[in-house]
Image: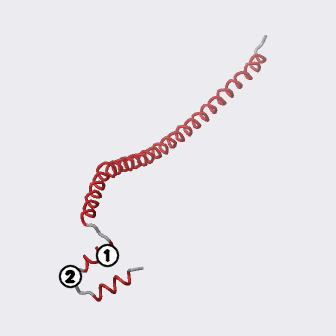
């Protein structure tokens, strides 16, 4: 396009008004340019204050909630592991107690059976 022409003109012209010449060549209107800069600054400030900051605040709150959720998940995992260990220990103790009760019941049944088998023998040995 006109870029090589501009560079050629810039190299050949050593005048202090080069910027003004380039601005005139591209049709730069300083009052409109300054008004546009001011308008852009106002819009940028309004967006920063009323849009960007609230969005950042919401994102920070969300990040904190996620961090809390992860911390709670780790805590719950630890509690679950502890509860499972306690449950397993209780089941083991219940199994031991059940086996002990079964052995006691077998011993009691063996004693009762021995007593019951001795009754007819004792009754037979008694004189009538």
Mark 1 is surrounded, within 10 Å at the Cα level, by few (under 14), some (14 to 19) or many (20 or more) other residues, namely few
Furthest residue in direction top, as rendered:
128
Quarter placement of the C terminus: top right
Q: Give percent across and percent down for residue 101.
A: 60, 31
Which disc number belongs to residue 16? 2
Q: Give percent across and percent down for residue 2.
A: 39, 80
Scheme by which the image is coloured = secondary structure
Place residue 114 in its image quadrant.
Answer: top right
Relative to 101, is 124 on the left or the right? Answer: right
Q: Give percent across and percent down for residue 110.
A: 69, 28
Place residue 27 in its image quadrant.
Answer: bottom left
Which disc number belongs to residue 42? none
Q: Going 27% across and 54% down the picture, which residue do you hit?
A: 42
Relative to 10, is 127 on the left or the right? Answer: right
Q: Going 49% across and 45% down the picture, which residue do you hit?
A: 81
Q: Nearer the viewer, mark 2 or mark 1?
A: 1
Is residue 3 or residue 67 the one in the foreground?
3
Q: Is 105 drawn above or below residue 85 in the view shown?
A: above
Residue identified by numbered label 1: 25
Relative to 57, is 98 on the left or the right? Answer: right
Q: Secondary structure at mark 1?
A: helix
Quarter placement of the N terminus: bottom left
């Amino acid at each position: 396009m006109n870029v090589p022409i501009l560079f050629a003109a810039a190299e050949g012209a050593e005048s202090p008004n080069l910027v003004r010449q380039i601005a005139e060549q591209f049709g730069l209107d300083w009052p409109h340019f300054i008004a546009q800069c001011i308008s852009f600054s106002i819009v940028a400030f309004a967006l920063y204050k009323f849009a960007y900051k609230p969005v950042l605040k919401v994102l920070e709150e969300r990040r904190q909630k996620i961090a809390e959720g992860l911390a709670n998940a780790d805590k719950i995992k630890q509690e679950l592991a502890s509860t499972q260990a306690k449950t397993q220990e209780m089941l083991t103790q219940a199994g031991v107690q059940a086996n002990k009760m079964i052995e006691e019941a077998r011993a009691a049944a063996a004693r009762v059976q021995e007593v019951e088998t001795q009754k007819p023998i004792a009754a037979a040995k008694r004189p009538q």
